[in-house]
Image (cartoon, rainbow, N blue to C red):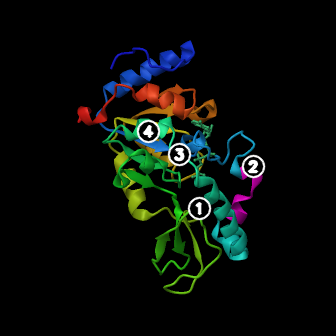
Amino acid sequence: MSEGNLGVEFDAAVGAKLGQARRILNRCNRVAAFSGAGLSAESGLPTFRDSEPDALWSRYDPMELASVSGFEANPVRVIDWYNWRRANYAGVQPNAAHRALAAQSRMIQITQNVDDLLERAGVPRQQVYHLHGSILRDRCQNSACEYNERIDPASPQPLRSCPHCGAHMRPAVVWFGENLPQAIWDRAQGLCLALDCLLVIGTSATVYPAAGLIELARQCGSRVIVVNPDPRAAADGGDVYLAGSAAAVLPALLEGFDLASHS
Ligand code: APR
């Protein structure tokens, strides 16, 4: 890859860091991405803890709306809130960051996001590890029942019972206090044990165990490149911190890089 004209105006500091990050990538064969809500922010989906006024947890109580106890206390309120979020998904499209990642045909995407924008940008489903589930599916609240189904965000349904066991149906997302899907979590950890570089994109890296993947990758020798407009996201670990939005930085960072040819 050459430094070349990356097609996006960056200030000199970011431009220098971008060159450093591109040189790191160019020496890597095993690269994965770990993303959070910031990756989908420029598609119009709100983040959770951002400084933006529409950040979800600055407006709503996560314990009321994203926990089993909150659901058991008031299931209608929780279902209605998720259906409100789902209504936001109807017209949402992948942004340039999703597309830049999708162009890396061999890159595994470990994401905390519950949207399907990476898949809609072209990432094969089996290459997207959704650590926190999917807002586009419902599942039975009865852990012994495995019934789940895709829902249409444009026509969400009110609180309803599982057709298999009669328990409540709920969004197929991981709520606070719940375990991550074990097989996906195991695969994500296994991947981070053997990376040359982890791209950390649009996450505050404050929610565990997911955020622990960054330190795990680092402890196993991986470089870390952080893409985030907020420097606090790189406070304790990014080898290279790229101060900017995902939709601006990722196309510039990945331009000319082809992970598939690095195998
Ligand atoms: N490009 C890149 N990063 C961005 C952008 C953008 N355009 N806009 C905002 N960000 C950054 C913010 O600076 C912040 O660091 O994205 C991050 C979003 O952080 P959070 O809102 O905490 O979202 P996330 O890290 O995904 O949260 C993790 O917490 O509530 C749970 O389950 C929820 O999966 C979520 C988890």
Between the C-alphas of marks 4 and 3, the distance is 10 Å
Please tell me how many numbered marks the rendered image carries.
4
| Dot 2 or dot 3, earlier in sequence | 2
| Dot 3 or dot 1, earlier in sequence | 3
Say left or right for 12 vs 184. right
Say left or right for 190 vs 64. left
Is 195 situated above or below 209? above
Residue 5, labelled with which disc? Answer: none
Between the C-alphas of marks 4 and 1, the distance is 23 Å
Give the amino acid at mark 2.
Ser
Mark 4 lies on residue: 99
- Magenta stretch containing residue 156, yes or no? no
Mark 1 Cα within 10 Å, few/some/many (few <14, many 20+)?
Answer: few
| Dot 4 or dot 3, earlier in sequence | 3
Which span of residues is magenta-colored? 57-66
Magenta span dominant secondary structure = helix
Mark 3 lies on residue: 93
* Residue 66 visible at all: no
117 or 15: nearer the viewer: 117
Image location (x, y in percent) of residue 138: 53, 70
Mark 2 lies on residue: 58
Between the C-alphas of marks 2 and 1, the distance is 25 Å
| Residues at marks 4 and 1 touching, judged by CB atoms closer than 8 Å | no
Residue 154, labelled with which disc? Answer: 1
Say left or right for 205 vs 250. right
Label 4 CB sits under 8 Å from any ligand 1 atom: no
| Dot 2 or dot 4, earlier in sequence | 2
